[in-house]
Amino acid sequence: MSYPEMRAQAEGMLDVGDGHRVFWQVGGNPDGKPVVVVHGGPGSGCAPGWARHLDPARYRIVFLDQRGCGRSTPSAGDVSVDLSTNTTDHLVADLERLRAHLGVSRWLVFGASWGSTLGLVYAQRHPDRVSEVVLFSVTLGTRRDIDWITRDMGRVFPEEWARFRDGVPAADRDGCLADAYARLLADSDPVVRERAARDWCAWEDTHVGTVPGHRPDPRYADPVFRMVFARLVTHYWRHGCFLTEEEVLRGADRLAGVPGVLVHGRLDISSPLDGPWRLAQAWPGARLVVVETAGHGASSGPGMAEAVTAALDGFAAT
């Protein structure tokens, strides 16, 4: 059910203002149906494996690395880089700039995890520019979701969560942990910053591991990736993803007329199924596909990758 990794036919750096340059790449069929890949994190960057869900004979595939991560510049891993111009509003505007830059009239939005939140916000603000939406491991970016991951998942992994909590000063342990870690990641001492990045990413790799056979994400072994990822995730989470509470759900009616498929694993405990289920109830034209044996991510269990690819194949010819 998977296609080859994408061969880039064009790439570049798009100046999106505020000193940021966003890396983009295009492959697949130049005359195919345009699709933009919205990666997770925030801060994961767009990996070549995303294209394996997309038929290169039928899709014109657009990758981009969101502000501050991947090959985009400046890197959020540099503690001197100001993150104040890295918000959800900025990322939505960047997507629109890239669409216009590439001469795309409308495109399918394909995202996962944080990318599903960002993709939904983009689609709600620019529904006339979106042909369809395919999302998996769906998250809505609410304060409740953030609290669930940073605190309530400690009921599932109590020992690991205790280590995560104890990575911040005692005075900060009953407050917002994303806020506390963000302060450590901005510390003048590189040893403090590196320890915070390790502790944050260790917890990130733990709370998604709810399926037997979960393998650690090898990206967290890279100190550069760790720092970029930790700085951006804590930045977004401490600010509630720069969204008003329940903004994505309240804006679902704006997607009337835009078909969508939401693919979610039953065993995705860190991003519970009630989020995408509520979204599917509020979004006319959305279809929820529940994969009983999967957790969080495309490789989180049997049937997940196949369901995602099938959804994209279903829209490829439309």
Image (cartoon, rainbow, N blue to C red):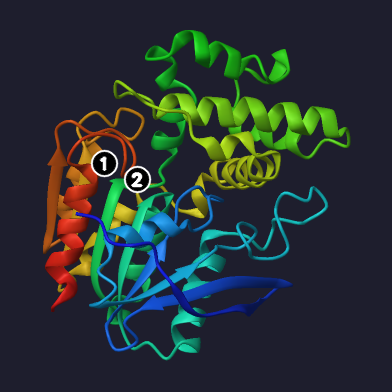
Name the residue nearer the viewer: 308 or 5.
5
> Could you tell me residue 295's position as x and y percent?
28, 33
Name the residue nearer the viewer: 19 or 2.
2
The amino acid on which the numbered mark 2 sits, given as a three-letter code, is Thr
Outermost residue on the right side: it is 188
> Could you tell me residue 206's position as x and y percent?
46, 24
Q: Which residue is drawn at 62% across and 34% down?
A: 221
Name the residue nearer the viewer: 47 or 289.
47
Outermost residue on the top side: it is 159
Residue holding disc 1: 275
The amino acid on which the numbered mark 1 sits, given as a three-letter code, is Gly
Q: Can residue 279 be seen in this view?
A: no
> Could you tell me residue 223's position as x and y percent?
70, 38
Residue 194 position by quadrant: top right
Give SS at disc 1.
Answer: helix
Q: Label 2 vs label 1: CA separation?
A: 7 Å
Left or right: where does residue 200 sit relative to residue 312? right
> Could you tell me residue 243's position as x and y percent?
46, 53
Rendered image: mark on residue 139: 2
Left or right: where does residue 88 sit relative to residue 295? right
Q: Do the residues labelled 2 and 1 touch (CB within 8 Å)?
A: yes
Q: Is residue 127 above or below residue 206?
A: below
**Label 2: few (<14), some (14–19) or many (≥20) C-alpha neighbours in 10 Å:** many
Q: Earlier in the sequence, mark 2 or mark 1?
A: 2
Q: Residue at x 66, y 44 (%)?
A: 231
Q: Is residue 35 visible?
A: yes
